[in-house]
Image: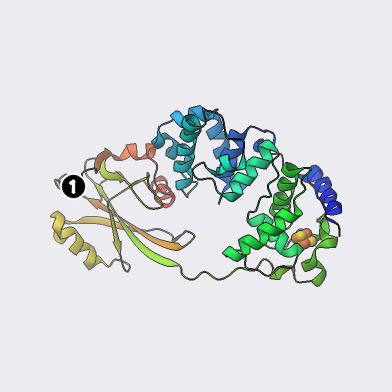
């Protein structure tokens, strides 16, 4: 079927069915960029309240650029993948310093901003400025892989190239913004990963996988080579309503707070725990502690097994393993940004009382 026929079917369907979301009612590149960064790796229903909080607190890119990074991370808390928030903050400062406060209006300019990749640049370029760039995200790849019954694995470099070429070829250059929105929306609401609603799909007559009856075989994914398992043990020391935290300097949770961390090769046994406490002058005989094993936390390439050891101190620690450990009141932890599993643990547990 001719692309122009598919384009008009697709746009008709989109205009009848699209979900009204605040970032679709604006052409302001700042708001569109905010929504795109928030929605990376995040569902719309989860991202929407964050979008509202960010736009209320930072109504302009200047406001975001001038914000304290800790405040930005705190507002981001719970969304995960915190590098997005750090990059977003840095990119806002780049726009103020390198672009005179004006959001760049070319694809290359947008792509030069920190944290902005091909997908996000194409989305902003088309949604805000109607530039002719086809977006390619997971939803678009799924639609295209089924439409063409194309078995190139979507999670490989070859797959990205192949599907970008198909997306470029399919782009409606007369309506790039609406077209991109429509393909993404189709993937999100009709051509879903499981049980796609082919009967209500505007592309059904042209869809090879539907005609062949093997929609469930697409998209194809290459199995991941490895999934690293890590054992993280946090020491949640307590003394007179105070504890010790530091701000992480590296890794996926850079900029967030944590308790002293010990990473072990395997689940820590109690005897290992006692041995680790010895150099801190904490002896087994009078050690009061409680162990909390959190649910495993899956990230894209690793699974984290987290144990929190709540340890009651007789005296304040007079050693500090690093210069920047901070001794803080436990009731002040609510104001700091923690990694999501730790925040959940803190919110669900009342742990300020001394152990029995
Ligand atoms: Fe997806 Fe079905 Fe539409 Fe094909 S017909 S694009 S499988 S929803």
**x and y percent of residue 150 in the render?**
71, 68
**x and y percent of residue 230 in the render?**
37, 64
**x and y percent of residue 332 in the render?**
33, 36
Q: Secondary structure at mark 1?
A: loop
**x and y percent of residue 165 in the render?**
69, 58
Front one among 126 and 265: 126
The residue lying at 27 percent from left, 39 percent from top is 328
User: Is residue 343 rendered to the left or right of residue 136?
Assistant: left
User: Is residue 317 rendered to the left or right of residue 142?
Assistant: left
In the image, residue 231 above or below residue 136: below
The residue lying at 41 percent from left, 49 percent from top is 339
User: Is residue 329 rendered to the left or right of residue 171?
Assistant: left
Q: Quadrant of residue 191?
A: bottom right
Residue beneath label 1, please? 320
The residue lying at 65 percent from left, 37 percent from top is 23
Front one among 120 and 249: 120
Label 1 packing within 10 angstroms: few (<14), some (14-19), many (20+)? few
């Amino acid at each position: 079927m001719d692309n122009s026929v598919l384009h008009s079917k697709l746009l008709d369907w989109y205009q009848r069915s699209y979900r009204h979301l605040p970032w679709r009612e604006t052409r302001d590149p700042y708001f569109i960029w905010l929504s795109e960064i928030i929605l990376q790796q995040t569902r719309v229903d989860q991202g929407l309240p964050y979008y509202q909080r960010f736009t209320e607190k930072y109504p302009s890119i200047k406001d975001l650029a001038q914000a304290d990074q800790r405040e930005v991370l705190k507002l981001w808390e719970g969304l995960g993948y915190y590098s997005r928030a750090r990059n977003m903050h840095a990119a806002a400062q780049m726009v103020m310093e390198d672009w005179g406060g004006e959001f760049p209006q070319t694809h290359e300019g947008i792509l030069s901003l920190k944290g902005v990749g091909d997908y996000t640049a194409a989305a902003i370029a088309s949604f805000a400025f109607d530039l002719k760039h086809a977006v390619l995200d997971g939803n678009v790849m799924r639609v295209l892989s089924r439409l063409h019954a194309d078995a190139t694995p979507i999670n490989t470099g070859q797959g990205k190239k192949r599907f970008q070429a198909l997306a470029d070829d399919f782009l409606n250059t007369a309506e790039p913004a609406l077209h991109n929105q429509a393909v993404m929306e189709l993937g999100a609401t009709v051509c879903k990963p499981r049980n796609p609603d082919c009967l209500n799909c505007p592309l059904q007559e042209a869809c090879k996988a539907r005609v062949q009856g093997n929609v469930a075989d697409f998209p194809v994914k290459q199995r991941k080579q490895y999934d690293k398992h890590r054992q993280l043990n946090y020491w949640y020391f307590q003394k007179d309503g105070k504890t010790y935290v530091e701000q992480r300097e590296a890794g996926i949770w850079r900029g967030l707070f944590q308790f002293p961390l010990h990473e072990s090769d395997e689940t820590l046994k109690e005897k290992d725990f006692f041995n680790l406490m010895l150099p801190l002058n904490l002896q087994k005989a009078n050690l009061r502690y409680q162990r909390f094993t959190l649910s495993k936390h899956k990230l894209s390439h690793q699974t984290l097994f987290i144990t929190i050891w709540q340890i009651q101190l007789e005296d304040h620690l007079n050693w500090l393993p690093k210069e920047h450990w901070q001794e803080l009141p436990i009731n002040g932890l609510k104001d700091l940004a923690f990694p999501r599993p730790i925040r959940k643990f803190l919110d669900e547990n009342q742990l300020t009382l001394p152990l029995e």
